[in-house]
Image: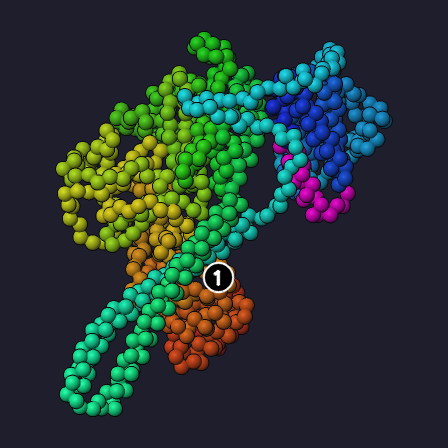
């Protein structure tokens, strides 16, 4: 490969990745298409292979150019009608794509692709195209005079695969086919297939999303790093906070106006009394004292001023209300637009699914049709990336375990071809993904036997276990119904990955399966990980939120409906018995408890397990802006994160999966510790105030979340100059400042604070990325009371340092 510009190489890699995806999708479509649609797809495939070859030639990737040329020759014969695109020929083309994919995904430190592997793949393609093998003649080694020949001594390109490409099987040459007879344009139009529609469980018809090739110029796009989008979303979240503060100022103005109007009414009463006093004085024919005359003029002037200020405040309040409504609309629109930048269509991850199902089914001599429905649905990229591996495992599991071979299916009275459906749809703020097959279904007895063999349950557990709970055992680590370990399954890891990933997305899993009738697995996950719908609830004096996707129902029930079974309180809701657990006991919330005649309960669901949690108050569902809590709080059981409410209040978001696990006696994740939850406090005048000064939004947010979670009132500034200006209006109990900042750094701010008589006694903590002795000394010389180093930063050290300086 020539020494091309690194940026050009990056563009080439991105371009070839798109070509490979389109070629894979096109091959799958061609195998299922007929008539004119098939011809158009073959032409498009040939164009893509030609373009990929040309791009490789431009940057000197001789291997990709050679393979691409050989693929182009095969497609030329198929397009001319002299070669049938049989499954064997398709396998040869797939081998070529896999070889290029392996090279594009390789690392510089990996082994190079052996030349004999490359030569075998290329020769199989050339054999299918009716060409001589490489090296047979000098001309054959140079396709069209532009390609690069591969021989035993040739150096392989330096983009290499992570695993050796598999060698393709030689393709038997079919008899040449006669050229197809030319058709009139009207005949071709008449052969255009109508749109394919699918009907699933008697639902209304909807178009299937089997990957289609778009035969039109691509829309202009701009690639943007995800971190930039994350940064933009964080800034939009700060705009949301500013909007909330603006609304709070409007409310304060309204309160001042109401107070002023009360004073004005009181003043008018005093003025009326004063006027009566003046009139009596005038009726006595006595002259008014000069002081009284001056007081009369003042009262008249005061009345005018009161009326004017009241009018001005009323107008100001109205204008601020209008401005705030406009700001709210614009910020909501901006937030939606920025969030949409992270949204990607589901089809962006399903491109390899058809190919995977095809390859596994051919290896196992099965005929399986995968139908993808709803590929146009858009999902947050973080959610989408996390979904790919679970879906791969579910599809592989269906092909390997669920769907039978054709003879077995026919003997059972089923269609020879197995049906596999992948369906995605958006329901409100959650994405619902269904993976269903019409295979053999779950064998409950076999599942229980295997679970006992690997020690997941005891015989006593198996005896009383419901079918619903037994089905969920397949998601346990180390569980597999396969007796032998193969390249596809048998290690008991795949379904555990599904459960772990879905729970990590704050989602849940549902399983429906009957022996001999197939299996349907439904995944529920949020559309976005930054904004969710949540239910607000009260436990003792604390407020929390629970993701709506985990909530099955909310009810108020009479206390007499509670009964006891096996020493546990139970209730029946929607004809289903379930445990009743007081949430305050799980969270170790302090306070006295006295159960009333009616109880507020919220039913949380993890997979098919449901638990009713008794709470002290239930509020409406609302949209929440999620924010991380940092490493320490993130490792506490029962906490999924934190959320910013419309009022600006930060509250904890509970982990419903942890709560259900704990309530049902399941094993808790080993990497998280159960600790006392930090008690949240209301904003009161006596609350300690911390000023956080940092130009990094990540560091500011981390510190703010940690401090607010344990009860501090936090004010933030983005540089020293802003902090110094804020100190004229507020007096914090402690200041935490970064060192390196624009406009005014932390050392300069510390000097100003410590030299000013009004602020010199405020404890000052510096936060630095370096721990050099000279920098630490410079901080203490500036007046800092303590130092924190970012590389050793954690929640407990921050809180301990604050405690030490107060």
Q: Position of residue 196 (x, y in %)?
A: 54, 22
Tell me the residue at 37%/39% (across/down): 549
- The crowd level at tag 1 (other Cα within 10 Å; few <14, some 14-19, many 20+) is some
* Quarter that holds the C terminus: bottom left
444 sits left or right of 779 in the view: left
The image's colour scheme reads rainbow
Q: Toward the viewer: 313 or 362?
A: 313
Count of numbered badges drawn on the protein: 1
**Magenta stretch: helix, strand or loop mostly:** helix
122 vs 88: above or below = below
Whether residue 611 is visible, yes or no, is yes
Percent coordinates x, y for residue 469 in the rendering: 32, 29
Residue 241 visible somewhere in the drawing: no
Asked if residue 36 lies in the magenta stretch, the reply is: no
Position of residue 198 measured from the top left corner of the image (x, y, whole percent) = 49, 22
> Dividing the picture into quarters, in which one does residue 18 lie?
top right
**Magenta span includes 17:** yes
Q: Secondary structure at mark 1?
A: helix
- On screen, residue 68 versus residue 394, left or right, reads right
Q: Residue at x 49, y 56 (%)?
A: 235
- Specify start and end residues of the magenta stretch as a single range: 1-21
What residue is at 29 percent from the left and 26 percent from the top?
A: 466
Q: Is residue 349 left or right of 648 when viewed as pictured? A: right
Residue 756 occupies which quadrant of the picture? bottom left
- Does 263 sit above or below residue 709? below
- Would you name the residue on which mark 1 appears? 790
Report the residue at 46% width, 66% height from top.
717
Q: Using residue 665 as the reference point, say whether residue 330 is left or right of it.
A: right
């Amino acid at each position: 490969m020539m020494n091309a510009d690194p940026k050009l190489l990056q563009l080439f890699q991105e371009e070839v990745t798109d070509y490979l995806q389109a070629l894979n999708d096109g091959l799958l479509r061609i195998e299922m298409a007929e008539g004119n649609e098939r011809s158009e797809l073959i032409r498009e495939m040939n164009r893509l292979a030609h373009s990929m070859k040309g791009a490789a030639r431009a940057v000197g990737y001789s291997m990709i150019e050679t393979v691409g040329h050989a693929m182009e020759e095969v497609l030329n014969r198929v397009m001319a009608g002299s070669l049938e695109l049989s499954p064997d020929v398709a396998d040869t083309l797939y081998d070529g794509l896999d070889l290029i994919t392996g090279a594009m995904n390789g690392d510089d430190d990996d082994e190079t692709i052996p030349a004999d592997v490359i030569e075998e793949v290329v020769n199989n393609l050339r054999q299918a195209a009716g060409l001589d093998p490489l090296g047979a003649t000098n001309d054959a080694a140079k396709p069209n005079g532009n390609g690069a020949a591969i021989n035993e001594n040739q150096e392989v390109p330096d983009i290499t695969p992570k695993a050796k490409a598999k060698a393709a099987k030689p393709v038997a040459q079919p008899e040449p086919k006669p050229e197809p007879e030319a058709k009139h344009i009207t005949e071709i139009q008449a052969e255009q297939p109508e749109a394919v529609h699918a009907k699933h469980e008697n639902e209304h018809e909807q178009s299937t999303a089997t990957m289609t090739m778009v035969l039109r110029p691509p829309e202009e796009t701009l690639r943007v790093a995800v971190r930039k989008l994350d940064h933009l979303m964080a800034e939009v979240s700060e705009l949301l906070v500013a909007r909330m503060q603006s609304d709070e100022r409007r409310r304060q103005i309204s309160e001042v106006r109401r107070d002023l109007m009360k004073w004005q009414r009181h003043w008018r009463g005093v003025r009326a009394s004063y006027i009566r006093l003046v009139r009596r004085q005038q009726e006595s024919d006595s002259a008014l004292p000069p002081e009284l005359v001056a007081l009369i003029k003042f009262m008249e002037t005061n009345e005018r001023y009161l009326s004017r200020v009241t009018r001005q405040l009323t107008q100001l309040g109205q204008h601020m209300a209008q401005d705030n409504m406009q700001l709210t609309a614009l910020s909501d629109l901006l937030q939606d637009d920025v969030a949409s930048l992270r949204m990607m269509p589901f089809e962006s991850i399903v491109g390899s699914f058809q190919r995977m199902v095809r390859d596994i089914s051919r290896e196992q001599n099965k005929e399986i049709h995968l139908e993808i429905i709803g590929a146009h649905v858009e999902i947050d990229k973080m959610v989408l990336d996390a979904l790919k591996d679970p879906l791969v495992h579910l599809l592989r599991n269906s092909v390997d375990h669920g769907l039978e071979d054709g003879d077995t299916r026919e003997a059972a009275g089923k269609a020879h071809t197995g049906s596999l459906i992948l369906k995605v749809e958006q329901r409100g703020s959650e994405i619902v993904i269904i993976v269903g097959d019409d295979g053999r279904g779950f064998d409950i007895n076999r599942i229980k036997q295997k679970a006992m063999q690997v020690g997941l349950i005891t015989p006593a557990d198996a005896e009383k276990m419901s079918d619903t709970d037994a089905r969920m055992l397949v998601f346990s680590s180390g569980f597999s119904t396969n007796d032998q370990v193969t390249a596809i399954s048998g290690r008991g890891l795949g379904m555990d990955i599904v459960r772990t990933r879905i729970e990590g997305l704050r989602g849940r899993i549902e399983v429906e399966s009957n022996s001999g009738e197939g299996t349907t697995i439904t995944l529920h996950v949020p559309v976005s990980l930054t904004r969710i719908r949540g239910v607000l609830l009260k436990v003792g004096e604390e407020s929390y939120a629970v993701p709506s996707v985990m909530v099955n129902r909310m009810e108020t029930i009479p206390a007499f409906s509670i009964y006891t079974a096996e020493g546990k309180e139970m209730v029946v809701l929607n004809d289903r018995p379930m445990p009743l657990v007081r949430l305050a006991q799980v969270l170790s919330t302090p306070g006295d408890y006295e159960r009333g005649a009616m109880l507020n309960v919220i039913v949380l669901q993890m997979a098919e397990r449901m638990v009713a949690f008794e709470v002290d108050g239930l509020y409406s569902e609302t949209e929440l802006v999620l924010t991380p809590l940092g490493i320490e709080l993130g490792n506490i059981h029962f906490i999924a994160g934190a959320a910013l409410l419309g009022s600006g209040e930060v509250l904890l978001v509970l982990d419903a999966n942890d709560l259900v696990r704990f309530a049902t006696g399941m094993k808790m994740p080993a990497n998280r510790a159960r600790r006392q939850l930090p008690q949240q406090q209301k904003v009161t005048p006596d609350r300690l105030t911390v000023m956080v000064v940092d130009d990094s939004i990540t560091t500011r947010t981390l510190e703010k979340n940690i401090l607010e979670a344990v009860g501090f009132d936090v004010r933030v500034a983005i540089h020293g100059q802003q902090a110094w200006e804020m100190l004229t209006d507020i007096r914090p109990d402690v200041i935490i400042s970064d060192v390196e900042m624009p406009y005014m750094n932390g050392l300069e701010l510390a000097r100003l604070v410590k030299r000013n008589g009004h602020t010199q006694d405020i404890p000052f903590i510096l936060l630095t990325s370096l721990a050099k002795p000279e920098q630490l000394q410079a901080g203490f010389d500036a007046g800092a009371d303590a130092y924190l180093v970012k590389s050793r930063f954690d929640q407990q050290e921050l809180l301990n340092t604050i405690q030490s300086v107060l």
